[in-house]
Image (tube, grey):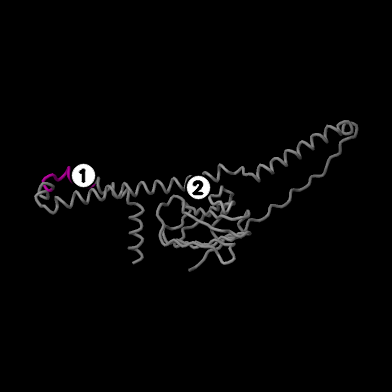
């Protein structure tokens, strides 16, 4: 039963290409066996059924292709918007602070130039850089990247996009992403996939976690999960774990 379900989902996902392939085979059959086609035309049922079938297949394939194109364009826009908005207001303020600090250092250097020239220079000890903090805990065989993106919800001015990628194929993925601040809402999609089935999502009771799962498609290294959460305060990822429903 599970195999039949997976095959049906594959047909739905591949229907634009599949319908075009079937119509091509039909056209090839018309060219190779014109006599059989003429015999079928004498049957009134076939004369009515074949055009209806071909028309329904062509129209449904065209409509599904437009739908998948719209889904992919939305995914691309969601990902590219985050890239274009890396320089947010907080980043610009931070840059301004560094520039002001740089100007202050230049003025101090000019003021003390004569003293520096008279005094012999002494080698200064190299101060080791502070250790880089370890990333938040992450589930095995997966890693993530998070960045701020523009929010589409006026009541939640902050948005964080989290891209989670697996190193191994996962069937029936179910994850929980925890944050250091309460979140109001969230959504997700599988990059490069227009059809998802058995989708579930929600916010944990303490409003600091986003829980989601899907039965189709499989979560593979080629198709990462893109999650966007919305909050009233800037939030960062505190941890990610796999769930078992």
Q: Determine whether the residue tagged by mark 1 lies in a helix, strand or loop.
A: helix
In the displayed structure image, the side of residue 181 where residue 124 appears, left or right: right
> Is 91 situated above or below 174?
above
31 in the magenta segment: yes
> Which residue appears at 59% of the width and 55% of the height?
231
Report which quarter residue 185 is drawn in.
Answer: bottom right
Q: Which residues are magenta?
A: 25-36
Q: Quarter-wise, where is residue 100 in the image?
A: top right
Q: Nearer the viewer, mark 2 or mark 1?
A: 2
Q: Residue furthest front?
A: 155
Depth order, front residue of 133/197: 197
Q: Which residue is mark 2?
A: 78
Q: Provide residue 16's location: percent of width, then percent of height.
A: 32, 48
User: In the structure shown, which secondary structural element does the residue marked by tag 2 occupy?
Assistant: helix
From this view, report whether residue 163 is shown above or below residue 80.
Answer: below
Q: Position of residue 28 (x, y in %)?
A: 21, 44
């Amino acid at each position: 039963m599970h195999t039949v379900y997976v095959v049906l989902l594959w047909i739905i996902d591949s229907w634009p290409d599949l319908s075009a392939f079937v119509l091509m085979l039909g056209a090839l059959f018309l060219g190779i066996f014109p006599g059989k086609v003429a015999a079928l035309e004498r049957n009134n049922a076939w004369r009515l059924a074949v055009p209806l079938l071909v028309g329904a297949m062509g129209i449904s394939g065209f409509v599904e292709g437009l739908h998948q194109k719209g889904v992919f364009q939305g995914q691309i826009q969601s990902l590219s918007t985050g890239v274009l908005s890396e320089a947010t207001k907080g980043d610009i303020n931070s840059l301004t602070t560094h520039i002001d600090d740089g100007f202050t250092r230049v003025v101090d250097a000019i003021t003390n130039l004569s003293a520096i020239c008279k005094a012999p220079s002494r080698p200064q000890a190299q101060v080791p850089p502070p250790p880089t903090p370890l990333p938040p805990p992450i589930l095995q065989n997966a890693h993530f990247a998070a960045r701020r993106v523009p929010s589409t919800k006026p009541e939640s001015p902050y948005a964080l996009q989290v891209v989670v990628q697996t190193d191994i194929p996962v069937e029936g993925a179910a994850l929980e992403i925890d944050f250091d601040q309460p979140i109001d809402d969230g959504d997700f999609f599988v990059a490069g996939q227009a059809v998802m089935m058995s989708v579930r999502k929600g916010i944990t009771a303490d409003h600091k976690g986003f829980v989601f799962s899907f039965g189709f498609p499989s979560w593979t290294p080629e198709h990462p999960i893109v999650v966007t959460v919305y909050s009233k305060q800037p939030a960062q990822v505190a941890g990610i774990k796999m769930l078992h429903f």
